[in-house]
Image (cartoon, rainbow, N blue to C red):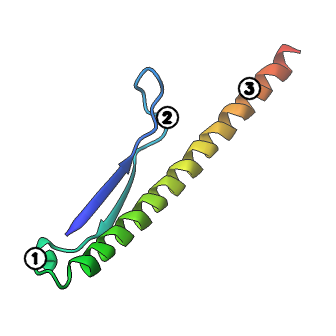
Amino acid sequence: MKMEIIIKIKNDDGSETIKPIIVDTEIPEYEEFKGPDNFRETFDKYERAVLKARNAAAEIATQEYLTELSKKKAVQKSRKKKES
């Protein structure tokens, strides 16, 4: 079984600033949760996989965000130089 985490960064007008970031991760099947003896262990596997995927998605999205920010700053600086 897989979980898919998607991160989108949008402008106030709804347009997307960067392409969506998608991270897949394997999670335990429902059957693995059956029985009182293995619930905690299985849930721990689930939680670790989800946190790892979330952190990876957020890291990639932040890198993309900062890349776009640096592009915008470079354009603004060149505009100011032309105006001077």
10 Å crowding of disc 2: few (<14), some (14-19), many (20+): some
Q: Is residue 57 left or right of residue 24?
A: right
Q: What residue type is labelled 2?
A: Thr
Which is more N-terminal, label 1 or label 2? 2
Q: Which residue lies furthest to the front in this view?
A: 36
Q: Residue 31 carries which label?
A: 1
63 or 71, which is in the foreground?
63
| Residue 14 locus on image (x, y percent) | 40, 25
Q: Is residue 79 above or below residue 17?
A: above
Q: What residue type is labelled 1?
A: Glu
10 Å crowding of disc 1: few (<14), some (14-19), many (20+): few
Cα distance in 3D space between marks 3 and 2: 17 Å
| Residue 33 locus on image (x, y percent) | 15, 75
Secondary element under disc 1, as helix, strand or loop, is: helix
Residue drawn at (26%, 77%) of the image: 40
Q: Is residue 43 above or below residue 82?
A: below
Secondary element under disc 3, as helix, strand or loop, is: helix
Instruction: Say which residue label 2 marks.
Output: 17
Which is more N-terminal, label 2 or label 3? 2
49 or 19, which is in the foreground?
49
69 or 51, which is in the foreground?
51
